[in-house]
Amino acid sequence: MSMLTPYERRNDIWGAFRDFEDSFFRGSSSAGCKTDIRDMGDKYVLESELPGFDKEEIGVELNGDYLTITAQRNCGDDEQKDSYIRRERSVCSYQRSFNISGCVSDGIEAEYKNGVLKVTCPKMQKTQPQTKRLEIK
């Protein structure tokens, strides 16, 4: 792998730290399921890249305070499998979980279009503490 890294970056301690930081926070599960999360004021919007998946191959589940996105594709059942010289796309699956403890789970909606899964999570409304004046007896 170091052969593919430019020489300047291999000898740069900060470059090595950035590589470590990128791999630590990205993790292996997000390599194919990159997700952007936007705060839109009254809701959060998650946009996950899942190119090449059919809508039926994608699952969005709520379990307590966690929203889990899964996608699985199996290309190994083709009747023409003997005609391949090389096959690298036999099985592909991704899974990501997100903490949604600040969202209203009943209002979460998901839409899949052009290889992007868009999940909209409405935020819980913050209740203002009520001020009450007590009568002194």
Image (cartoon, rainbow, N blue to C red):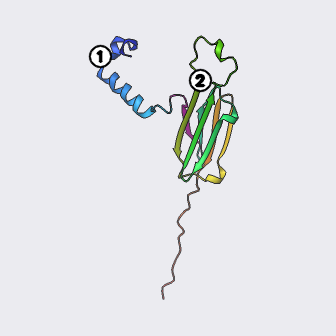
Q: Residue at x 45, y 32 (%)?
A: 26
Tell whether label 1 touches label 2 (CB within 8 Å). no
Up/down of 28 relative to 103, above or below: above
- Residue 30 on image: x %, y %: 50, 32
Three-letter amino acid code at the position of disc 2? Ser
Pointer 2 residue: 90
Q: Specify the quadrant of the image occupied by residue 8.
A: top left
Q: Specify the quadrant of the image occupied by residue 9.
A: top left
Determine the secondary structure under disc 1: loop
Magenta span: 31-39
Of mark 2 and mark 1, the one earlier in the sequence is 1
Mark 2 or mark 1: which is in front? 2
* Of 70 and 115, the residue lying toward us: 70
Q: Residues within 10 Å of mark 1 (few under 14, many from 20)?
A: few
- Residue 106 on image: x %, y %: 65, 53
Task: Using the numbered discs, state the Cα–Cα distance from disc 2 to disc 1 in whole angstroms.
Answer: 37 Å
Up/down of 90 relative to 59, above or below: above
| Residue 50 part of the magenta segment | no
Disc number placed over residue 11 in the picture, else none: 1
* Of 43 and 1, the residue lying toward us: 1
Q: Specify the quadrant of the image occupied by residue 44.
A: top right
Horizontal side, residue 7 vs residue 83: left or right: left
